[in-house]
Amino acid sequence: MVAYYQIAGKKVGSHYLAMGVLGAIFGTTYLATRGGAAKNPAQGPPINAASKDEEQFIQDFLKNVDGGSKAASH
């Protein structure tokens, strides 16, 4: 036997109410725990160089420093 409830002028079965409540609980849990967009942790602060050559020099220097520290640690 199904119990019926009067909601907004319509008869709604208790099994539909139960499915709606469970769907809302699982749906909100999924949306709350799925996480945000992945951030790029390797990206550092912006380079404020006076010229394009200076910016390229800084980028090359940072690549060499990063590459040297990784090679020395292995």
Image (cartoon, rainbow, N blue to C red):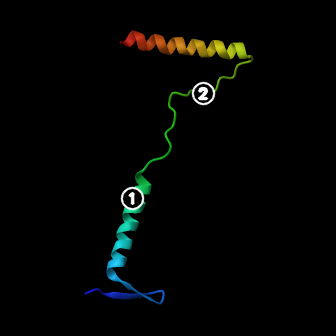
Q: Which residue is mark 2?
A: 45
Kind of residue indicated by mark 2? Pro
Relative image position of residue 32 (x, y in whole percent): 43, 55
Q: Quadrant of residue 70?
A: top left
Residue appearing at x 39%, y 58% in the figure: 29
**Residue with the most extreme left position:** 1
Q: Nearer the viewer, mark 2 or mark 1?
A: 1
For residue 21, the mark is: none
**Is 64 above or below relative to 40?**
above
**Residue with the most extreme right position:** 50
Q: SS of the residue at dot 1?
A: helix
Residue appearing at x 28%, y 86% in the figure: 2
Residue appearing at x 48%, y 46% in the figure: 36
Q: Which residue is mark 1?
A: 29
Q: Residues within 10 Å of mark 2 (few under 14, many from 20)?
A: few
Q: Are marks 2 and 1 in contact (CB under 8 Å)?
A: no
Estimate the spatial distance between the alpha carbons at disc 2 and disc 1, rounded to whole Å.
35 Å
Relative image position of residue 65 (x, y in whole percent): 51, 12
State how many labels appear. 2
Q: Quadrant of residue 23?
A: bottom left
Relative image position of residue 12 (x, y in whole percent): 39, 84
Q: Quadrant of the N terminus?
A: bottom left
**Is 55 above or below relative to 5?**
above
Kind of residue indicated by mark 1? Thr
Pick the residue in front: 15 or 35: 15
Q: Quadrant of the C terminus?
A: top left
